[in-house]
Image (cartoon, grey):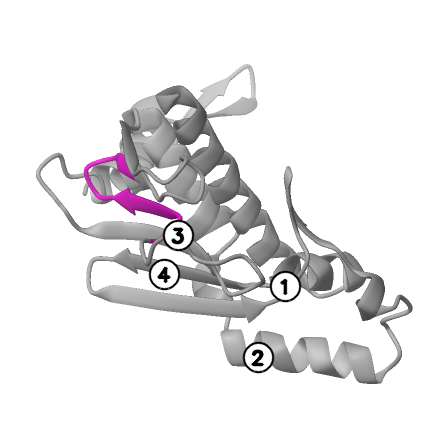
């Protein structure tokens, strides 16, 4: 892609730096997730989130939330009274979600094994000052009496990634100093909010 250099204009012995707005716009469009990922004909899964385990009996083996490359969102029966519902995201909403997960929170850099080790190290140093026995794991409005494992799968082109972490909500509350833990929790909250939005729209 050709990018125009900055233009230098000398006037009254002052140098003005004039950037080409066309160049900026082209650069932004070339790297926007909507142009690189969203494919109206694709059934490829881009993001998939589920919460496994806990005391709740699974209603279905389907994931809680699946986002496809064509912008469709499928929400599993845990949020929809045993049904499966779908909604079509707008291109801007799809772009915003992908930017949040892949760029802002950089899910690629979150490694499950490394994250587990960080949590164990923090616990061994006495960072945990609260009793785990008194912890109530709550997914927003849903209170669950036992912890679950957060599982998030992502794919862009040939690149795939899987992140799993047990007891994410409680660990994120206890260890605010662990950056990857906070980023993973933020991603889960974003996906949880989307799942509830789609489920509520279908009612």
According to the image, label 4 marks what residue? Answer: 153
Element type where label 3 sits in the image: loop
Q: In the shown orientation, is residue 115 left or right of residue 154? A: right
Residue 199's label in the rendered image is none
Q: CA distance from mark 1 to mark 3?
A: 17 Å
- The residue indicated by pointer 1 is 147
Where is the N terminus found, in terms of image quarters? top left
Which range of residues does the magenta coloring cover? 63-73
Q: CA distance from mark 4 to mark 3?
A: 20 Å
Q: Compared to 186, does 97 lie above or below?
A: above
Q: Above or below — where is 147 with respect to 2?
A: below
Q: Nearer the viewer, mark 1 or mark 3?
A: 3
* Closer mark to the observer between disc 3 and disc 2: 3
| Label 1, label 4: how far apart the Cα atoms are | 20 Å
The kind of secondary structure element at disc 2 is helix
Residue behind mark 3: 59
Marks 3 and 4: in contact by CB < 8 Å? no
- Rendering coords of residue 10 (x, y %): 47, 22
What residue is shown with label 2? Answer: 114
Give SS at disc 1: loop
For the residues bearing labels 2 and 4, Cβ distance under 8 angstroms: no
- Residue depicted at x 27% and y 31%: 26
Considering depth in this image, is 177 or 8 the residue closer to the camera? 177
Magenta-drawn stretch contains 66: yes
Decide if residue 121 is on the left or right side of residue 199. right
CA gap, disc 2 to disc 1? 20 Å
Q: Earlier in the sequence, mark 2 or mark 4?
A: 2
* Element marked by disc 4: strand
Q: State which tag comes first along the sequence, 1 or 3.
A: 3
For marks 3 and 2, the one nearer the N-term is 3
Point 33% across, 34% down: residue = 94
């Amino acid at each position: 892609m050709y990018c125009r250099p900055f233009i230098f204009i000398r006037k009254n012995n002052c140098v003005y730096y004039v950037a080409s707005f066309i160049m900026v716009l082209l650069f932004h469009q070339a790297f926007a997730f909507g142009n690189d990922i969203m494919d109206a004909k694709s059934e490829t899964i881009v993001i998939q989130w589920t919460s496994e385990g806990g005391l709740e009996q699974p209603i279905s083996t389907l994931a809680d939330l699946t986002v496809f490359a064509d912008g469709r969102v499928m929400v599993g029966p845990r949020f929809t009274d045993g049904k499966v519902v779908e909604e079509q995201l707008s291109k801007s909403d799809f772009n915003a979600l992908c930017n949040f997960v892949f760029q802002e929170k950089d899910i690629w850099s979150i490694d499950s094994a490394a994250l587990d080790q960080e949590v164990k190290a923090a616990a061994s140093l006495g960072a945990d000052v609260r009793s785990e026995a008194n912890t109530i794991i709550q997914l927003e409005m849903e209170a669950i009496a036992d912890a679950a494992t957060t599982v998030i799968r992502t794919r862009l082109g040939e690149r795939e990634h899987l992140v799993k972490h047990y007891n994410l909500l409680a660990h994120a509350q206890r260890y605010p100093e662990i950056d990857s833990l906070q980023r993973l929790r933020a991603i889960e909250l974003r996906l949880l909010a989307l799942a509830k939005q789609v489920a509520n729209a279908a009612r």
